[in-house]
Structure formats: C-alpha cells, structure tokens
Amino acid sequence: MLPLILGVGSAFFFAVQIALTGAAVRGQHARIEIILWVQTTFVLLTALVWVAVEGSAAMSIQGAAVLLAAGIVAPLIARTLFVKSIARLGSNIATPIVLSSPIVTVLLASTLLSEHLGGVGWTGVVVTLLGGLLVAARPKIISQATPKPLVSPVLLALPVVSAIASGTSLFLRKVGLNMGVSPAFAALITSIPAWLVYSGWLVVRSPNALGALQNLSSPALLGSGVAGSIGIVLWYMGINVAPLSQIAPLGALVPIFALSLNFLFYRSGETFSMGVVCGTLLSVIGVGLIAYNSVSQ
C-alpha cells in the first residue's frame, strides 16, 4: 500500500508543478529563465540534502559521465522546451505529448539493450501516439477563455522534441545507474548542467539578477518549485521501498491530474476540447500498456 501512496503522491505533485507553471507563465509572474532557474534550484537543493543524508559512496567515473550527458539532455533541453511549450500551447496540450517520453525510452532499450518490446508494448506505443495526435489536432473547443489559432507544426515540435529528450535522458540514467552510481548522486549530477546554464541565462538576460528575482514572491512560481521537489522526494522514497517497475508506471497519472487541476482552478486560461481530453486518456492508456509490458517480462 505504501509504494502505491508514494507513487500516486509523486504523480500528483508533478502535476501540481505543471499546473502552477502554466499559471506563472500566463500571469506573467516571471520570465521563462526565472521559472526554470527557480525550479531547477529547488531540485538541486533537494539532491544536495539527499546526498548529505545518504553520505559518501563509491562512484563510477564512466557512469558519472553518462549521467552528466543525461542531465544535459534532460532537464536542460527537455525542461526548457517543456516550459516554452506550456507558454505557447498551454499545459493541457503540452503535457500529454511530453509525457509520452516512455516511448523513446522503450525504443532505445529495445534497440540498444536488446530488451524485447512485445505485442502489448507496441500496442502501447501506437495508442500513445494516437493520443498525442488527438491532443495536437484540437477539434471543437469545450472551454477556452480566448480563441486561439490552430497549432502550427513548428510549435508542436517543442513538446515533441522535449518528449524525445526526456525519453533519451531516462535511458541514459538507467545506463548510468547500472554502471554503479547511487541514485542520490545521479539526481545531483543530472541537475547540475541545467542549473549552471539557467544561472548563466538569468545573468545574461538580467544583469541585475537579484532585482529579477523579486518575482520569487509569486505563489505560483514558488509553489511550482516546492511541488516539484516534493514529487522527487516521494518518487525516490517509492523506489526505495518497491521495484522501479511498480512505481514508474504511476507517472502515467500525471496528465490526468494536470488536466483535472487545470479544469478546477485554471479553466479560463487553458484549452479544453474532446480532443484534449480523449487524447490525454489515450496517452495514459498507452503508457500504461508499455509499463505493463515491462513488468510482465
């Protein structure tokens, strides 16, 4: 029961972070570089505390290098594109597409690690892709404050590339952990590249960086950082008491939670349509099939 509570809890708080990020972007409480810096700083501090609590441990140099590459791919590239996707498309459209990233991870594992995907897994891939297409199509609107033009392929490339980057990073993290790096140091190593780049970006865009950070008083911005950190803590607590194969599939609940939170609290600022709702459900089912295939092997 405890692993289920931890896994569902982590999915909920990740969804809260997504919803609050959308609120911060729409309300113009902070520029994108500030949002990224704040969220990554919370993650970095969480990882530092975790390493301090766990203590020192032997670390593979090769594994650390792989995890450093994973950190460059995500969160650096993936999160940057994800936040930009939320700013341009809204979180209801961006989230289901980005969270189809397990497709990339499974395909890489199948190709490079000779892991068998199977019929159920391939069915999950197809269903997830169909869900993403439904979300992108955006048919008749159910609820939307201001009519928006149809999504262009250029804008859709943002969440698609973010999903590819996230899936690739998960694969690289798996490789790094298999090479002997502890989860605590893995979390720290993968957060460093993004934090350094976002810090530099913040200084370049805002020479008076301290003045730019006055937006830290924004509840949505601070809340997104806190929620993301809580999600990470719960996720790692989950994999400490249960196999990863039991916790990871619960991440498919994130789009459902995010869609529900946006409908309850941010309905006027997000797009709701049958395509968005049905596409989100299909994406969750598809990721669930992929997870079931992995567990059953």
Image (cartoon, rainbow, N blue to C red):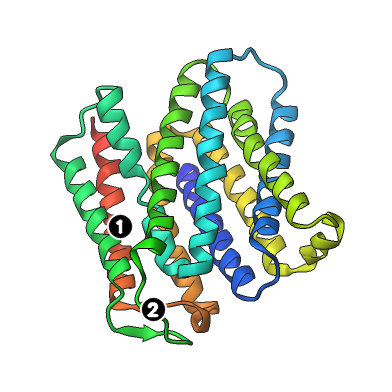
Which numbered circle lies on residue 283? Answer: 1
Residue 211 seen in render? yes
What amino acid does circle 1 point to?
A: Ser
Q: Residue at x 48, y 47 (%)?
A: 7
Q: Which residue is mark 2?
A: 272
Q: Earlier in the sequence, mark 1 or mark 2?
A: 2
- Quarter of the image for the C terminus: give it: top left
On the image, the x and y values in percent for residue 84 come to 53, 60
In this rendering, the answer to whether 1 lies above or below 17 is above
Mark 2 lies on a secondary structure that is strand
Residue at 80% of width from left, 60% of height from top? 213
The answer to whether 256 is drawn above or below residue 197 in the figure is: below
Q: Position of residue 296 (x, y in %)?
A: 24, 34
Residue 49 vertical position relative to residue 144 in the rendered view, above or below: above
Q: Quadrant of the N terminus?
A: top left
Q: Residues within 10 Å of mark 2 (few under 14, many from 20)?
A: many
Q: Position of residue 34 (x, y in %)?
A: 70, 57
Q: Residue at x 67, y 42 (%)?
A: 197
> Left or right: 179 with respect to 37?
left
Q: Which mark is residue 123?
A: none
Q: In this orientation, which residue lies closer to the viewer: 269 or 206?
A: 206
- Under mark 2, the amino acid is Phe
